[in-house]
Image (cartoon, helix red, strand yellow):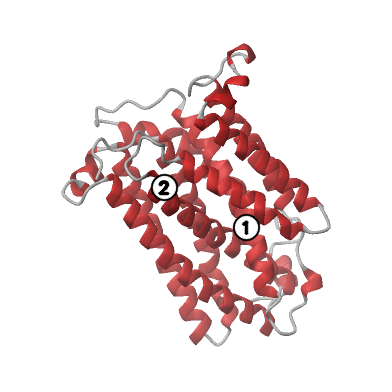
Amino acid sequence: MRPITEAADAEGPGRRPGTGRAVALLALVGLATLIPLLGPRAALHGTGEAAAPGVGGIALLRAVLFAALCVPAGELLAARLARRVPGAPLEQAPRSWAPYAAIAGFVAALGLASVVATGNLLPHHLSDIDVGGLYQSRDGKLALLEVNAFLAAGLCALSRRPGTQVWPLAAAAAAEALRAHPATEHGPLVGSGLTLVHVTCAALWVGGLLHVLRLLRRWRGGPAGAALLGLYARVAAVLLAALTATGLWSALRRMPPGTIVDQLTTTAYGRTLLAKVLLVAAVAVLALWARLRLRRAPDPLSACSPARGEVVALGLVVTVSALLTALPLPIRWS
């Protein structure tokens, strides 16, 4: 890999270093925003299903909420792995994004709580929101728990012990898992447990890789960077296995084996799930490519190139997952 100074010089004398990266990041954020906003119409087309009003906005809020879980969880994982690397320049850590993620998560959770407070409809006026009603329903209490969890996570991130934010983040993940499986569902605790493991592993995988790459950029390569990337690769393999197992089990609970092939093409939920599976398969290919480079390439840090592509693909997975939570569930249950 080229040194950072050489890369900056190659950008030209009239261009600020990092401008191209910032433009690319904005373009990716714009693309990720379009998925929850425009995805419902494409997924529902020709299925005969009807989604709740404002499904695009709800999916966007959930995408922000999921991303806000990924960033601090990944920072905690990457920091833990970095402490296990001999000779790692721990003092050269990048600035934490956890406080900003907590703000974004708080705003998204507040928006979702306002939807619950209006009977799962988008509020048009402040008078439409029944704040007191949140305390009287299961969904309302879970929505308030997520709001308070992100507020507490932000305070923990700004404190002298940022590691304590693991507890409010765990509470937010648990609330999301319980929200996704209502009490009327068959075996709701099993479904919530699967979702909790799935969400936790996804947050660690996405956020962990993002922060590992940020650490490598600050460390400017070297043996410590290669060792950190190797540690993360081993953890990611376990996370991928857990994600695959919990995702498959959850899909089979909602779409029995005898109907899953038809529902993957004839229901909005199935179509979106199929898109998510294809994206995860692409992520797995990129992860394998990075792992092969890490082991066999003369420069192990050349694995950063496919790893960056993996981060982008994982970001798309997060947005598609958010869309999946906002669409109507399959009619048949196992």
Residue placed at 53% from the left, 72% from the top?
235
In front: 138, or 44? 138
Badge 2 marks a residue whose secondary structure is: helix
Q: Is residue 312 visible?
A: no
Position of residue 273 relative to residue 85, above or below, is above
Q: Amino acid at mark 1?
A: Ala
Q: Amino acid at mark 2?
A: Leu
Position of residue 42 relative to residue 246, above or below, is above
Residue 53 image offset from top left, x and y in percent: 43, 22
Q: Quadrant of residue 245?
A: bottom left
Number of other residues with Cα within 10 Å of mark 2, as a class: few under 14, some 14 to 19, many 20 or more: some
Residue placed at 52% from the left, 21% from the top?
122
Number of other residues with Cα within 10 Å of mark 1, as a class: few under 14, some 14 to 19, many 20 or more: many
Residue located beneath label 1 in the image = 73
Residue located beneath label 2 in the image = 189
Residue placed at 46% from the left, 71% from the top?
237
Is 27 on the left-hand or right-hand side of 15? left
What distance separates the C-alpha of mark 2 from that of mark 1? 24 Å
In front: 283, or 22? 283
Q: Point out the image quarter for the C terminus.
A: top left
- Most extreme residue toward the right is 160
In front: 139, or 242? 139
Residue placed at 67% from the left, 85% from the top?
223
In front: 238, or 209? 238
Is 16 on the left-hand or right-hand side of 300? right
Residue 248 image offset from top left, x and y in percent: 32, 57
Residue 43 image offset from top left, x and y in percent: 33, 36
